[in-house]
Structure formats: structure tokens, C-alpha cells
Image (cartoon, grey):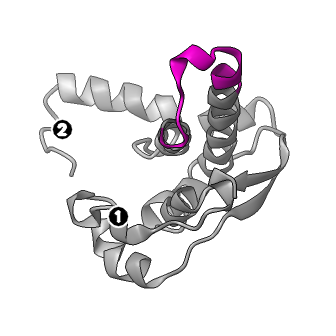
Amino acid sequence: MSFLERSLDIETYDLNGCHCLSPHSKKLKSAHFSTKIFCDPVHGQISLHPACVAIIDTPQFQRLRSIKQTGFLEYVYPGSIHNRFSHSLGVCYLAGKYIRELGERQPELSITDVDILCVELAGLCHDLGHGPFSHSWEKYMHMASLQKKVNTVWK
């Protein structure tokens, strides 16, 4: 059985130490996750590990559906309307593809299934901290913090 075909043994993961998943740990521990196939507009059908599915199914990840990937660019290019959710799924898929290829081409690296999953999860979660309007928002927040108009710490 391949790594992607295995279901996630959620009991082996300490969800209480995970800030994002801890409110959902009871639900996650009682659920049975399996590999899920997503229809990606760029890569076609992609299969993701149950650990990725567990993260995708959280409200924190689902909010990426409402954040535009290209910020204000759709005003210049009306067809550029994709969101950070679909982008993150694609990055997860490509990260896994690249690390597997690296492992095949350089076996001396001894890349394990856990290494592959870690890289996939990093790709999946890389945009979770983005606010609305992407990098335009970051520039505003930086300017506002320099003017000391924003002095609260986001948790």
C-alpha cells in the first residue's frame, strides 16, 4: 500500500499542541480520513494525503476560498479570478511531485514518506497567513505599523 493510500492515524499526532487544529481535535480523532481527489484547473485530478485533507477541512483553511490569489490584478486582467484555496492545493501537489522526483534522482538523500508529507503540508499551508488583497494588504499593514497606527499583535 502506498503512502497516499494509507489513512491518517490521527492518534499518533499531538493535536493539542497544534494551535490551528486543537479546537477540532475531537472531531479529527473521531473521523476517518482517507485520500481525497480534487479537480484542479491546472493539474487535473490530484490526490492528497489524509493529513492534508484534515487540514483542508478546517475553517482556517476554508477561508482561503474567499481570498483572491492575485489581489487587485483582476481589475486589469478580468480572467484572473482564482483564489488562494485552489493555489494552495496546486502548490501542495507540486511540492510533493518535486520532492518525489528529487528522491528518485538523488537516492542518497534518503527522502522518506514523512519527508514527502512534510513538504506537501508546507506547500499546502504556505498561504494561511495571507490577509485580504494579498501582498497589497501586507504593504498597507507595514506602512500602518510604521506610523504606529497598528500596535496590536494578531493571534
Q: How far apart are marks 1 and 2 (CA)?
A: 40 Å
Q: Nearer the viewer, residue 33 or 69?
A: 33
Quarter that holds the N terminus: bottom right
Q: Which of 78 and 10 is in front in this view?
A: 10
Residue 93, position as x, y percentages in the image: 68, 41
Residue 150 has which mark?
2
Disc 2 marks a residue whose amino acid type is Val
Viewed as shown, does residue 151 lie left or right of 130? Answer: left
Quarter-of-image position of residue 111:
top right
Q: Magenta segment, which residues?
A: 101-114
Badge 2 element: loop
Residue 71 is covered by the magenta coloring: no
Residue 102 is covered by the magenta coloring: yes
Viewed as shown, does residue 27 lie left or right of 151? Answer: right
Which dot, 1 or 2, sits closer to the camera?
A: 1
* Residues packed near mark 2 inside 10 Å, few (<14), some (14 to 19) or many (20 plus): few
Query: Which mark is first along the chain, 2 or 1?
Result: 1
User: Residue, x 48% and y 45% (percent of image)?
Assistant: 125
Disc 1 marks a residue whose amino acid type is Thr
Relative to 154, say whether 138 is above or below.
above
Residue 87, position as x, y percentages in the image: 66, 42
Badge 1 element: helix
Q: Nearer the viewer, residue 76 or 11?
A: 11
Viewed as shown, does residue 115 lie left or right of 1? Answer: left
Residue 130, position as x, y percentages in the image: 44, 41
User: Residue, x 27% and y 57% (percent of image)?
Assistant: 18
Residue behind mark 1? 12
Relative to 93, say whether 141 is above or below.
above
Residue 96, position as x, y percentages in the image: 64, 36
